[in-house]
Image (cartoon, helix red, strand yellow):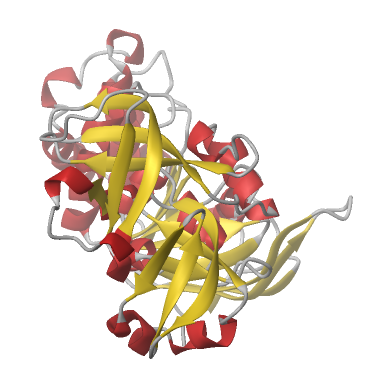
Amino acid sequence: MANVAFEHVEKVYPNGFHAVQDLNLEIEDGEFLVLVGPSGCGKSTALRMIAGLEDVSDGKLIIGDRVVNDLSPQDRDIAMVFQSYALYPHLSVADNIAYGLKIRKMSKDEIAQRIQRAADMLELGPFLDRKPAMLSGGQRQRVAMGRAIVRDPAVFLMDEPLSNLDAKLRVQMRAEISSVVHDLGTTTVYVTHDQVEAMTMGDRMAVMKAGLLQQAGPPQEVYDHPNNIFVAQFVGSPPMNMVKGRLSQSGDGLSVHVGDKDLVIPASVLDERAGLRKYIGRDVAVGVRSEDMEDASLTPDASQDRRLNGTVTLVEALGSEIVVHFSLKGDAVVTEDTKLVAQETGDEALDTGPAGEVRWVASFSPRSRVRREDRVEITVDMERVHWFDPDSGEAIRG
């Protein structure tokens, strides 16, 4: 096993395209790191630089105790699992798994032991004599995983390995890959554009945009404390709701005017985000996650200064919750980041809607009885609201 470190790493292509910019990131020995971001953000380029499939334009790339900038791929002790399974159709599952070991002229006994170990971990025992054409997509992906596992590398690299599977198989394979990787304890870098995979699989996630690292940390920490509007909306499903609000003094505290409502900001929030006081009399971007709202009829004790009014446009009953789409009065937060996330997710909740309105999504208790076209009152958990500078997009904190 080995750690992987990017030190001021740059990747510039001959046509001038700057794919990765000043990347500083360390993946600890045995850590499972997920690189996530929209198409073209540089995540796959970063992975390919670790693999030696792309040259490093500047900076240092370190695996273990070696700078590997000029080291050939075969000398880096890595194993890669691709989006395509890349299996040899004329070979059996066992021979596909063993292919790399035979090239290294490993003994037959050692090869057999490693095949059996991988087959046991991946439940491939009954299929070892079959050809890839006789397997399902999930089984083929297990074979590709097995081929990487038997190499016993210092680092696993995985480039969107689940993107060719259907939704149900992706859920199953997410759990299987996580379990296998953690059992092996091998340093793993996993690339995906799917933030659900990023949230559920890794020890840490690193969010990239336009070649720049935006934030790295444990998934829940990134979700709860996003550095900027891009991370806030890209990480999480549905994306974080946004609206412009005007901050004003309210007694010893502050309130935020959204649409036709004034919401009081709790003292505990002001203690944690003292920087909000600098925005008195100015607009801020207000972010609220869907799970931090509730049907006000179910929270009768909630004060009026924590409530918004909206009109329901769609109700999705999912059993454990009701996903409610609604419009409310307010000015949309429109930045390059919000446009990028809307384009990437295709999520109409990020559309601005008519002038003076925003479209939001809330997760209500299944006890709610709201229906389409209802006027609804929504209770907002003000201690869970996120605050951003609308111009820079950066989170407002201390």
Q: Quadrant of the N terminus?
A: bottom left
Pick the front one: 365 or 194: 365
Pick the front one: 55 or 25: 25
Is residue 169 visible from the viewing direction of this image?
A: yes
Residue 274 on image: x %, y %: 44, 89
Residue 139 on image: x %, y %: 26, 23
From the viewer's perspective, tell me whether residue 136 is left or right of residue 301: right
* Residue 182 quadrant: bottom left
Residue 384 on image: x %, y %: 31, 66
Give the residue displayed 28% in from the left and 15% down from the top.
136
Count of picture labels: 0
Residue 18 on image: x %, y %: 78, 58
Is residue 200 visible from the viewing direction of this image?
A: no
Compared with 55, 121 (above or below) is above
* Residue 202 quadrant: bottom left
From the viewer's perspective, tell me whether residue 45 is left or right of residue 350: right
Compared with 352, 72 (above or below) is below
Give the residue displayed 40% in from the left and 13% down from the top.
90
Give the residue displayed 48% in from the left and 37% down from the top.
349
Compared with 21, 110 (above or below) is above
Give the residue displayed 51% in from the left and 78% down from the top.
248
Pick the front one: 260 or 276: 260
Pick the front one: 276 or 111: 276
Residue at the far right: name it.
15
